[in-house]
Amino acid sequence: MHAIDRDPLLLTPGPLTTSLRTKQAMLHDWGSWDAAFNHITAEVCRQLVDIVHGAETHVCVPLQGSGTFSVEAALGTLVPRGAKVLVPNNGAYCARILKILKILGREAVELPTAENCPFDPLAIESALMADPDISHVALVHCETGTGILNPLPEIAAAVARQQRGLIIDAMSSFAAIEIDVRTMPFDALIAASGKCLEGVPGIGFVIAARDKLAASAGNSHSLAMDLHDQWIYMQKTTQWRFTPPTHVVVALHEALAQYQEEGGQAVRGARYRANCAALTQGMARLGLLPYVAAQFQAPIIVTFHAPQHAAYDFQTFYQGVRERGFILYPGKLTRIETFRVGCIGALTPQDLVHVVDAIAATLAAMGVMGARGATDAMAVV
Ligand SMILES: *Cc1c(COP(=O)(O)O)cnc(C)c1O
């Protein structure tokens, strides 16, 4: 096969394929003290708060690092020492929250749920009623480990009824799936530059209720991860505390401009749904079926059962699809062999059709399926 002189398309949940404009925004150098740069930071924060309609009640605190840094910072800053957190768990990112809480020495109550089932808001409400010491619920909105969407509006209502705080890891849903703080109240929401906003990775951010953040001084176990300190410093100086990832900030600013031009959350979400439909329909024709039932599937990333065939192995499959111009993602389930395909990034449904073609050609070359599509041997169990 001849080499293709372009970057492969990333079918992954971040880093993901970005537009040329977003990449070109990184061709300049910025000073961290410079007013023009700090104006961009302020502008980005304002726009991020507006995406969840939080201008009246919430503020945005950006933090250097990948998304997990901001999850850890939010939990460490907003959950007081001695408080107790309910963590509904249906996947790898929920488990990561449990691990963070353990390391931070914050008590956690796990509410285990099968990985192919969304959380039950009633079960969450019952757990809160049963234990008045629980002060917060830490919720993963789209569990990127499987691609399942958890019912945020109903859970936010249940948590509000029980007068506890809600901290949402909306890393892979923010800006693509509707989140409105006026109707889905939360203490804090965490997301990052390199997911559905289609920026490059390097910044996480926390959209926090101003009153809750103001009351959080001294909670954090850490200097660098103290969101309260980062917020106060930024308000005082307009600057980032410690060296900002300048190129990532200006790329995010440019990515946000394109997000608005595209039509914002509703239109971006619709494009991802179209991507997801093109993917799952094409894969179904190959006999490759999703792990998550269609009604629970977020249009962000799809987990597929691996072909049940002796000639299949993920490494060879991955390499073959990569040589055809696309980067897939390994599965994250421990007991079932799967792989994942992302629907997010600067991609169109046509790109997803091409991904399916590359997958079919690779599986044919591996002898896993006939050149014209699925065989009976591929039936998923
Ligand atoms: C991407 C993601 C994170 C952050 O992961 P990083 O590797 O730190 O960027 C956290 N939660 C969810 C649900 C995610 O999709």
Image: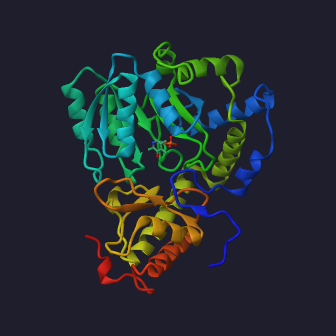
Up the image or down, 223 lies above or below 125; here it is: above
Tell me what residue is drawn at x 34 percent, y 56 percent.
Answer: 296
Instruction: Tell me, yes or no, if residue 52 can be seen here.
Output: no
Residue situated furthest left in the rendering: 130
Q: Nearer the viewer, residue 334 or 352?
A: 334
Q: Specify whether 381 is left or right of 199.
A: left
Task: Confirm whether residue 276 shows in the render.
Answer: yes
Q: Position of residue 276 (x, y in %)?
A: 46, 64
Q: Position of residue 263 (x, y in %)?
A: 61, 53
- Name the one closer to the observer, 19 or 106: 106
Position of residue 248 relative to residue 56, above or below, is below
Image spot of residue 191 (x, y percent)? 52, 39
Q: Residue at x 52, y 22 (%)?
A: 210
Position of the N terminus by quadrant: bottom right
Please give the name of the residue rendered at 28% of the width and 51% of the height, measured from the top-left corner.
Answer: 117
Q: How many labels sit on residues?
A: 0
Which quarter of the rendered picture does the C terminus lie within?
bottom left
Q: How is the image coloured?
A: rainbow
Against 268, residue 313 (above or below) is below
Q: Position of residue 148 (x, y in %)?
A: 37, 52
Q: Is residue 322 left or right of residue 152?
A: right
- Please report the residue visible at 54 percent of the width from the left and 23 percent of the height from the top: 227
Which image quadrant is residue 366 in?
A: bottom left
* Vertical side of 194 occupied by 49: above or below: above
